[in-house]
Amino acid sequence: MASKHRVAITGIGLVTPVGLTTQETWQALCEGRSGTSYLQHPDIDSYLYKAVGHVTGEQERLDAIVDKKIQRKTDRFIHLGLMAAHEAMEDAGLSKEFPENRERFGSLVGVGIGGLGIVGETATNLQNRGPKGVSPFSIPKAINNMAPNWLSMAWNLQGPTAALTSACSSGADAFGHAFRMIRDGYADYMLTGGTEACSLPIALVSFGNMRALSAWQGDAKKASRPFDADRTGFVLAEGAGILLLERYDLAEKRGATIYAEAVGYGATADAHHITAMHPEGIGASRAFAQAFDDAGIDRSEIGYVNAHGTGTPMNDAVETTVLKKVFGEHIDPSNDDHILVSSTKSMTGHMIGATGGAEIAFTALALKHQLVPPTINLDTPDPACDLDYVPHKARQKTMTHAATSSFGFGGGNAVVVLKKV
């Protein structure tokens, strides 16, 4: 489909387990530093799955951005989103006053789970203290749409504003729909991406009882092991990745820095299982094909794929099969200038609803700097995962296009394609 408007990424804000800003996060990724640790909790000895990716040391920065009264009315996933959005707005050179037409400026943010901790706390208070123990802010603190709505209130964004929830692909789907809103003329500017803060005991135990989490018992920094033969599951993490999308001609007119151009988005459903990918990756493959068609490019033009790469035994192998099916000889490591693949979740852990937004930001930065971040902890190659996953160290790569994929519980698949400018 021909684009009505080109779409630029002009601002990036990141708050992750490896850094409180975009610069800190990107440097950590390029240096191959892990942000995973073991949960600190009185009952931790009874937990089989203990590894998490926590954002730490953020309070001073949060206090400088978000009033204490607002902090008390909002949950942590909203705090992280506000911090990342503040950086994205400043990075793009936009404000509450500029641009003037706020009706053309919206916010679409992915949130996979939202205020899970608040729901648990409220249920406990009701049981122990009765109705008077329940805060009137319980619902506004917990519901997913309050992340983009607080962004709209913070910056007077009066355009399309909503939360999108599609599990692990929430952030990527939110970005894809925001991209389409600008491309198709419904908005000129959009804050988009994802935020999540559910690396809590209740989530750790719930995901753990699914046998989805890493059961690694050694150094916590090695717990997230995508594509490694010794992988046992993903590491539950928190964070936010918010991007500022802008009509390309408006960005050029004001001399904005453009990280990359958003050119394609594909979204499909496996219609197969509540947690597992389709064993043949049918839906994931179609999402790639849709994104390439949307971008108007051939698969051979992709230089890098930021993989979903969670570290679960079955899904990593299926994803490898999907990539081979989609890219064929172009991703074969024996060929010169083959497509590189890496999983940044090896360092950040899996930030659920925030993952898509953060990894789109990582992909944009990879294109801008022509540098592919590594997959760390890939110590024992798995014969079923035999692509070039850029083990241990970042690698320079000349490329014009890159793709990032997100696959969620329930079978949702999202692929975004970016172009170097």
Image (cartoon, rainbow, N blue to C red):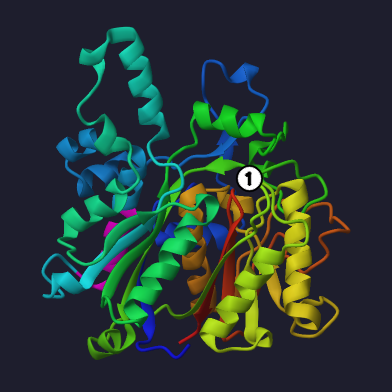
- Extent of the magenta region: 83-94
Give the residue displayed 56% in from the left and 41% down from the top.
236
Left or right: residue 143 versus residue 271 is: left
In the figure, 143 relative to 339: above or below?
A: above
Judge from the rendering whether residue 397 lies leftward or rightward of residue 132; answer left or right: right
Drawn side of residue 305 relative to residue 106, left or right: right
* Residue farthest toward the front in the current orientation of the protein: 271
In percent of the image, x 33 and y 22: which residue is there?
A: 122
Q: In this rendering, is residue 143 above or below 160?
A: above
Residue 33 in view (yes/no): no
The image shows residue 370 at horizontal and vertical percentages of: 56, 79
Residue shown at the point (17%, 64%) measured from the top left: 158
Name the residue located 57 percent from the left edge and 86 percent from the top edge.
Answer: 400
Q: Residue 285 in the image: state x and y as whole percent.
A: 68, 70
In percent of width and height, residue 394 lies at 64, 67
Figure label count: 1
Mark 1 closeness class: few <14, some 14–19, many ≥20 residues within 10 Å: few
Decide if residue 204 is in sight here: yes
Quarter of the image holding residue 87? bottom left
Is 75 left, or right, of 291 in this rendering? left
Q: Position of residue 141 (x, y in %)?
A: 28, 36
* Residue placed under numbered mark 1 in the picture: 274
Does the magenta-highlighted stretch encompass residue 93?
yes
SS at mark 1 in the image: loop
6 or 269, which lies in front? 269
Would residue 217 be counted in the magenta stretch?
Answer: no
Q: Which image quarter holds the C terminus?
A: bottom left
Which residue reaches farthest right? 383
Q: Where 227 falls versus 211 (above or below)?
A: below
Name the main secondary structure of what is drawn in magenta: helix
Give the residue type that dot 1 points to: Ile
